[in-house]
Image (cartoon, grey):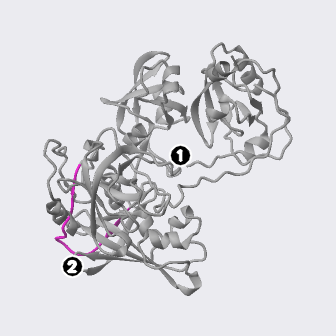
Amino acid sequence: MKPFSAPLPVSQRWLKLVSGLLATGVLAFAPLHAASSSEKPSVSLQFDNKPVNRETLEPASFSKVAKQVSPSVVTVTVEAKARQQRVSRSDEFFGGNDEFFRRFFGLPGQGRIPMQREPAQRGLGSGVIVSSDGYIVTNNHVVEGADRVLVTLQGNRNVKATVIGRDPQTDIAVIKIEGKNYPAIKFADSNNVEVGDRVLAVGNPFGIGETVTTGIVSATGRRAGIGLAYENFIQTDAAINPGNSGGALVDIDGRLIGINTAILTRTGGFQGVGLAVPSAMVRHVVDSLVQNGKVIRSYIGAGVQDLTPDLADSFGLENNLGAVITDVQPNTPAAKAGLKSGDVVLRLDETPVANASGLSFAVSLLKPGTKIKLEILRGGKKQTLTATTAQRPDRYGVNNGGLRGSDDEGENFSSSDVGVLNGVAVTDIDPASRRQLNIPKRIQGALITEVDPDSASARAGLKAGDVILEINQQPVTSAEDAVRLSEEATEKKTLVRLWSNGGTIFAVVDETEEDTSSE
């Protein structure tokens, strides 16, 4: 570690989406195993969970599938009264740009239209009929802030819709129209979807009318860096454009595998990266919204992180499959089960854990009070722990942290430039720093005040405002501990546990490259 003069003020950093992103930040789940079914389903959905036949040659035409699916896909028109700030969550992500909002919902016209000239904002999205008695799934960002919602059925028949419930954490909403015998789509199990499967996207791009495009599944379990609680999309190269939001992504048998939600783009147009909320999560959200008015999720109260190759090597694993426990909240199911920071979860019940998001999503889909078995690796040895899930608090996991900087003078702990974590300056956490950086009282460690931008620590992601909790799985309670442990380290690869941006993570600082470059 290297001394610096004092903690330096750091300006607040804002997370920005890819330039021109035409869909709001959304999230989705691809669970490791199926959610426990309710005893009395609130919505009568149709299922066909058989995997798609991957041995069949691709047909010359998908007209049969299009005719089958099209009656179930509707246009959703929303109207919202003019508001001083914003009419939709989309404004938050688009920096208040009205043009983005209109293009996203498929409205014609160019240029900004001042709000005072437009007493009501209107937008177009898509939706999917999921039950014969009129329940329709769409995106939360399509109907959020809407004062009036209309659904256009096949044949251009307009019907007024009621918003039943919204779930911003998955960007899924449920609306309902009165009547019976509607053409409900059939659900497939999105857990059976594989990369390379042929899919079709059906929706209402740019408000021009129902459109069908085709492509393949490009990836599953995709995270787009939106920064919300859950991201585990099905990615496709089937063309998805403004107005497609809330439309159907179906397999070649015409079964729903996802709800089209977002595109990533640098130009404002489709560039081959479309994202859909998997049907397994849609089913869970629909049932919970209709039955409870909100989504009931389970949790165990443990922070988790993906295993990078470096982390896997540090924990003695041959591959990076699994999820490492970064933090255990007190008085939670995880704490009662005996989980500890540094445990690597390998299996949930009988299902292998692929990554952190898969573990979180699988747990979230379970009914609160469900007993689960977790196979973990601790200290190089496998063992099995039993936990009982609990209902996740409404605000659990919301990141209220983040570096805001400090104008207070503080004393950095100085040391010689030996050991590991060179280029990192630390100090003890004082009350002022704790307040300014929103560091919880339970967090004890060494506060990083500066990181040399050319150092291995910077490349590993360490930054000012982070708190070092452990070095090579040894606890750090003060700046002096951090310096001592860094000087005692004999290996140039250092496993560091950090409190960062309101959560706990592991990082591996690899300084072997510095040694090589200096020879």
Residue lying at 48% horizontally and 30% vertically, measured from the top left: 307
Location of residue 447 (image quadrant): top right
Specify the quadrant that holds the N terminus.
Answer: top right
Highlighted magenta segment, given as a residue range: 173-188
Q: x%, y% of residue 348?
A: 36, 31
- The residue where tag 1 is placed is 397
Mark closest to the chain's N terminus, 1 or 2: 2
Residue lying at 42% horizontally and 35% vertically, measured from the top left: 355
Q: Is residue 155 left or right of residue 371?
A: left
Q: Is residue 243 magenta?
A: no
Residue lying at 21% horizontally and 55% vertically, measured from the top left: 255
Closer to the camera in the image, 329 or 73: 73
Q: x%, y% of residue 195?
A: 30, 42
Tell me, yes or no, if residue 87 can be seen here.
Answer: no
Q: x%, y% of residue 219?
A: 35, 44
Examine the rendered structure and indicate whether residue 409 appears above or below residue 210.
Answer: above
Examine the rendered structure and indicate whether residue 358 appears above or below residue 180.
Answer: above
Q: Is residue 458 left or right of residue 246?
A: right
Residue type (three-letter) at the residue carrying disc 2: Gly
Q: x%, y% of residue 394?
A: 50, 52
Mark 1 against mark 2, which lies toward the viewer? 2
Tell me, yes or no, if residue 141 can be seen here.
Answer: yes
- The residue where tag 2 is placed is 155
Specify the quadrant that holds the C terminus.
Answer: top right
Identify the main secondary structure in magenta.
Answer: loop
Q: Is residue 187 magenta?
A: yes
Neighbour tally class for label 2: few under 14, some 14-19, many 20 plus, Cα within 10 Å = few
State the separation of the CA atoms marked 1 and 2: 45 Å
Secondary element type, mark 2 = loop
Neighbour tally class for label 1: few under 14, some 14-19, many 20 plus, Cα within 10 Å = some
Secondary element type, mark 1 = loop
